Image: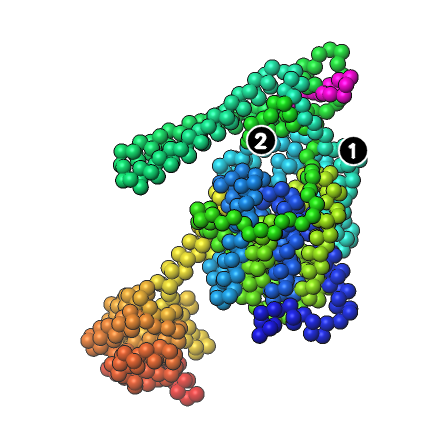
Amino acid sequence: MLTRIFPFLGWFKKYSGAAFRADIISGLTVALVLIPQSMAYAQLAGMPAYYGLYASLLPPMVAALFGSSRQLATGPVAVVSLMTAASLEPLATAGSEGYIAYALLLALLVGIFQFLLGVLRLGLVVNFLSHPVVNGFTNAAAIIIASSQLSKMFGVYVDKADLHFETIMRVIHGAMHYTHLPTLGMGVLAFAIMVGIKKFNPKIPNVLCAVVITTLLSWATGFNHDTKVDISAIQDSEVQALIADFNKSIAEIENLALKRTEIAALEDKAKSENNQIGFYDAEHDIAVVNYQVKLLKHKSHELRTALRQSLLDGVEQSDGSMVFYAQGKTPDGLTTDGRTWRLKVGNKILDTASLNMMGGGAVVGTVPSGFPALAIPELNVKVILKLFPFAIIISLLGFMEAISIAKAMAAKTGQRLDPNQELIGQGLGNILGACASAYPASGSFSRSAVNLQSGAVSGLSSVFTSVIVAITLLFFTPLLYHLPQAVLAAVIMMAVIGLINASGFIHAWKAQKYDGAISIISFIATLAFAPHLDKGIMIGVALSLGVFLYKSMRPRVVALSKGENQVLCDASIHGLRQCDHIAVVRFGGPLFFANASFLEDQITDRIMDMPNLKHIILVCSGINDIDASGEEALSLIVDTIRSGGRDISLSGVNEAVLAVLERTHLLEKIGKDHVYANTDDALCRTHAQAHQDGSESDCPLTTYCRISGNA
């Protein structure tokens, strides 16, 4: 019982000093990969980079302590990070306090849902996400993730559009206007280091090497070169006018937002007082305000784009201060500093007394030292209801990724894996992680592979990983200041390359064409609707369920006849001639309300198409269950056949179905002498009587019956 509640107690059976050393080495190795990866994935999720470290503190340790896999490495992963961003961006601005609060609440909901699934032993619910759907979604997500990092690689800033491909078009347009070459160079250098080291010696932590080298280079060359100035330092009237117009539009949007809140309160009051006129007036006023906000948002987008595309030359004054001129308009006699300066513009009003001017590349910046405060995320019912559907999707996707990795490793190590216990571990990891400022986490394929290859024996390796992250948060965060954002983008792009699996489409198509079609449609839908990734998954799940229902409503009903090897097989597939007097019909699947009438139609068709038919043998070996509708349909079929002077027998009826026939007394109606253990007996007992006075001289079942009878 203790081992069931605390699975980690089982680690120490036959544990040795050698195993302890192996776990320490594995934990350190995984941590060296996890620390830079987690910061990159946090930014993919729309969070400040250091929140990736928070998500790497408790979840790896807790998931290992209470899960069943001893090598699964939990923490921030690419797909879950992307899903987090897709879930939260409609609710708040990425990186804002509200956004972070929603992310922590989302992690709590994901953890609770996973924990409840595990406790209630409902791990099989993950089967609703079929392999073709996951394959299509994962391939599309890999492309979306990789392309979402292009703006950081080129050093351009754009507003996100409603659809992902529109955002990418904006990035490409911005890069064509101006690309910050040092930023692009840092990204390319990181790629070169990671690829080169991976080919030279895969055991060396290539991600860590790329991060260390580029961070040192960034610090040594002054890669990041920002300064804050008053608006008077910008010696260009057009740029000053753009700043003024932009601030005015943002202020008007904020005022309209307050007005909308006031009108919404009046609408609620009118609704509670059953004041129809007041309610409709408020509804109209809200529609007008929303339209005005939409116009202003479009205007602010255009102004923001114009400000971001304004390229300036900097001139240092004798007192060390800077003034800026539009490129190509610097007065004669003044020497520029050789940099291209840009104005950093977000979604808030620009402080004209302290404008942020960028003369270099973007870096991670200040990372707070120490541990995050422990607190339960703020619970808001309205927000919870909005996040809950996304929490379910993230829970299932994250768990499917984790359990797939865990199963693959368990096959190599021979350990016992309990999916429900793994759900409990992942759930507790996310619950406790949410209380320590972590966004949703899951099992990582790449880091789990590193953990296994490093020789991890138990989950203690993940505990040591968390300890290394804790030490980093306490003592080494200042070293991360100069880490270029382009390098984090390269880390993400390098990591998701492994998610692209074109062979998965081919494999699904070869298995079943409809599976291949579902996988392709899920892929296209996910790409088309991005960043609304839930729509792509929902379409895939709906198609999978639709195919399942269609197959359940129309199971395979085949006519059997003798093949060349004297074995009964599908007559239509093998082009076999059927007997004129006996129809051997095999029904594949449970007989229930959804397909009962289908069986009736199939039997009726055979009666109509075979004028000399005397006997039908219904092969029931594929019927593993029957409900009241199926039993009623079978009773009607018996009545229909026998009322026409024909007869029917059943063969291969399993015990569960036979019990239903006995309880409903249908067995008495059919006759126990018409129910046979197998089709061989049924044919040999009915063949002669069915061919009595028949005109068929060469029955394809004659030889079969003779051989079966002799056997």
Which is more toward the observer, 697 or 351? 351
Residue 162 colored in magenta in the image: no
Q: Where is residue 260 drawn, in percent x and y?
A: 41, 32
The count of marks equals 2
Relative to residue 382, is residue 6 depicted above or below? Answer: below
Rendered image quadrant of residue 351: top right
Residue at screen point 65% across, 70% down = 9
Residue 4 numbered tag: none
- Check contact, mark 1 vs mark 2: CB within 8 A: no
Q: Where is residue 348 drawn, in percent x and y?
A: 55, 30
Residue 316 colored in magenta in the image: yes
Question: Could one spot residue 356 in this view of the protein?
Answer: yes
Q: Say which quadrant the N terminus sits in.
A: bottom right
Q: Could you tell me the amino acid type at mark 2?
A: Gly
Q: Nearer the viewer, mark 1 or mark 2?
A: 2
Relative to residue 461, is residue 209 depicted above or below? Answer: above
What secondary structure is found at the residue carrying circle 1? Answer: helix
Q: Which residues are magenta?
A: 310-322
Residue at screen point 58% across, 40% down = 95
Q: Where is residue 101 drawn, in percent x and y?
A: 55, 45
Give the Cα separation between the discs numbered 1 and 2.
27 Å
Residue 221 numbered tag: 1
Residue 346 numbered tag: 2
In this view, the residue farthest toward the bottom is 710
Q: Where is residue 97 drawn, in percent x and y?
A: 56, 40
Residue at screen point 75% across, 17% down = 317
Q: Residues within 10 Å of mark 1 (few under 14, many from 20)?
A: few
